[in-house]
Amino acid sequence: MKYARLVVALALIGLLAGLGPHVLPEYWVRVLIVLGINIILVSSLGLSNGFTGVFSLGHPGFVALGAYVSGILTLELTKKGAYLPDLPGFLAGVQLPFLPATLIAGVFCALVAVVIGIPLMRLSGNYVSVATLGFLVIVNVVLVNAEQFTRGSRTFTGIPPYTDLGWVAGWAVVTLLVLSRVAYSPLGRAMRATRDDPIAAQAVGIHILPARLMAFALGAFFAGVGGALYGHYLVSFSPATFYVAMLVQQLTMLVLGGQASLTGAVVGVSAITLLSEVLRNLERGFSLGSLQVPAVFGASQIALGFIFILVMVYRPQGLLGDRELPLVTGGRVAKGAGPVYKDTVGGGRT
Amino acid sequence: MSDLEYVLQQLINALSIGSLYALVAVGLSIIFSLLRLTNFAHGDMMMVGAFATLFAQLAGLGFLPAVGVGILVSALAGVIIERVAYRPVRGAPDVTMLLTSVALTYILENLGILLFSSSPRNFPLPDWMNHLYSFADGRITFNNINLLTLGVTLLALLFLNWFVRRTQVGLGMRAAAEDLTAAHLVGLDVNRVIVVAFVLASAFAGVAGVLWAAQAGVVEPQMGFTPLLKAFVAAIIGGFGSIPGAIVGGFVLGALEVLIQSLPGDWGLSPYRDALVFALLIAFLLFRPGGILGVRQEVKL
Amino acid sequence: MKALELQGLEVAYGAVRALKGVSLEVYPGEVVTLLGANGAGKSTTLRAISGLVRPRAGSISFMGEPLTRLSPVQIVRRGIAHCPEGRRVFAGLSVHENLLLGASGRRDRGIGEDIQRMFGLFPILLERRNQAAGTLSGGEQQMLALARALMSRPKLLLLDEPSLGLAPLVVRSIFGTLKALKAAGTTILLVEQNVNLALELADRAYVLRTGQVALEGQAKELQGDERVARAYLGGAA
């Protein structure tokens, strides 16, 4: 059983990449690609938000950076001249293959995360959320204004359509393997300790800042990779692609599945992806017997919002809480921490 | 253009935008002080107020009565979101409440798009609102919208000051903001206090929404988002949870934005205004977490 | 008739069971004290009575009326005032405002008079009436917390550790006031770490250990009873 995870992982990649495009209808291939990308994005978000308790709202900022970095690095030289004539010399002559571009995108995001994380990871509770939201806004403004790199608020286009099911499945498996490795290692235990009780964690000699920074940077790395994959899937995008709507979608997936569970992230992503597809088809209008339900575009977002609130009210720990499949933890973790309780009337600190 | 006139003109601009930020930030701070809720849906109360005013006008009401309707509707919307979404999660961890408000704003904005479409609509104004005052051969100009923005904000803030200091419910609000558990123990009807707080905060946001729409000339479902973010910054640099802090923060932020855009010789910073504003927010959180007024906060670990 | 009756009260915070079936009673005009080590469940018992936490099982009734489904506000209006641990005065509000808030649940016209009565009971509060409560000394804050609780004209006063963190002289003065309240016929349920003081004041006592009543009896009889000390140390009662 030692290599169970690897075997399962390889089988999954092989099956999806080899067989998928031939047997599945194109529609489902596209759904699976988006699903896989979201698994990367949401599980990496969970590392900081769920496991470490740094509730970041800045994740789409890293996704955006990943998409743009990889896009710029892989653009054909002729297209580069046409679309981005003012690119500085060291970028203007570069055209990288997919894998190195993706890796550079991830590393770039991780570096950015370290730089902004050194100050931001000191903040607690709501404040780290507001500050990381500030980061998202700053990324957005910079992308809109850095026209020589990004074409500004206009659509960035011409990106080679490299992303296919094989790449996505491969990266999703790598992401989950690395994250599960980290989350259920001593470092991961330190991360969870800083979440549950920062003061006690410090008292037993855990350094909070490095633990949080590590989670934030690793999450950013995979956000960058996921962003690159998403960019090469969409082929054209603009700064608006990576903003509040994306944030809400990722958060919904994360909290539905359970913030401190990789299994939960996968479950949350799958549930919301399927639901979104169903709702998207429903909102085009349908007939129920003699009853004609007209098209209501936008209703699916509203339904997602309601699901989000229902989860917050009735099951704030998500479907899985912090439970995992044994496959994920590799048997390295005891049963989850005690639940968070709330006072009947709120605000109690006696 | 002489320097003095230029400075005066920019001062008018700063006061006008700053009072809007103050008006929105005050509501955020009131709610935060009571519930520790970072209320993202607050900006949508602006949208609700502006759209309600628009439709009241389309239904044949005059401008001022329509504004009254708009404010009432936004106050009502505040009461509804408190009852439906926030009360069930009251007392939950901060993040749960914050996420609930994020979901709520997503619902409200998409509902707005569903009902009114995402494209901006013209916001009709009576002619007198656009009446222009011009001094020093047109080097200093402002209109009734600017005057009204400042005047209404001052009135609203004076009213709030009176309400919080001189009324029973106001006293209850201050007590509950200090210590919610103790407020329960002395037999304060905390639910009522919180509902009143949402009425006030949302009505203020409604007023701000109408004034914002008047300045922009249009209303749209997502109009509340940017001012909301700015109001967060204002509230935090003033000292989150403090009413005077939100007011000071609002005007400071307004002045700062105008300063960035009017620096002589254009330092090329204008397009990065919003990024700078948020960089300032982060700087405040790190170096002066209590804000300008030094409100006691547990911001850091 | 019993003023207060708890039967088989169980309270849990998440997985932690704080009370495992506590039963006790308080008769009108009586002072009953609740003793026990830290974490024995004394404060939790008071919090359950005043509706701050919902019991998982068991019943609480006051003057024959069940309380378990009522909100804290409704419970205060029934005549129970809770003077919490750590005093919890509204630090940024003035002494006068704190007293006004103590009467939050009241609708009658006697509030002004009662404030004067409190100033009579605690003259130092009159001196400080417009000062922010946070600037008061610990003892003054405890007096304010007590006065604030009395402002609701309670039929039952719940007191949580009124001597906590106070100098011995101040403690004596606070307990002097409590004695006067007792003499005036106030019903009190007192949680206190200072066993001797508490047993001196009280008519009866209950000793809690890990969420259960380990010992109960007349205060006079428990004074000097070594079983009380043993309950604190966690041994067998």
Image (tube, rainbow, N blue to C red):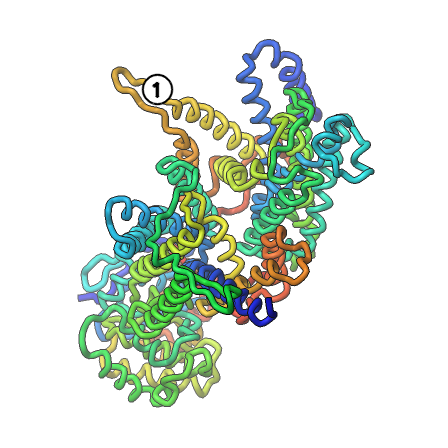
What count of labels does the image hold? 1
**Residue B191 seen by the camera:** yes
Whether residue A301 is situated above or below residue C2 in the rendered picture? above
Q: Amino acid at mark 1?
A: Phe
Image location of residue B201, percent across then percent down? 37, 59
Secondary structure under the numbered disc 1 in the rendered image: strand
Q: Nearer the viewer, residue A45 or B233?
A: B233
- Subunit bearing disc 1: A
Image location of residue A322, percent across then percent down? 54, 40
Residue found at the very far top of the displayed protein: A23
Please state, as top left, top right, bottom left or bottom right, where the N terminus of chain B lies in the image: bottom right
**Residue C52 seen by the camera:** no
Q: Nearer the viewer, residue A161 or A210?
A: A161
| Residue receiving disc 1 | A286
Image location of residue A166, percent across then percent down? 67, 20
Q: Is residue B180 left or right of residue B67?
A: right
Please state, as top left, top right, bottom left or bottom right, where the C terminus of chain B lies in the image: bottom right
Q: Is residue C146 left or right of residue A301?
A: left
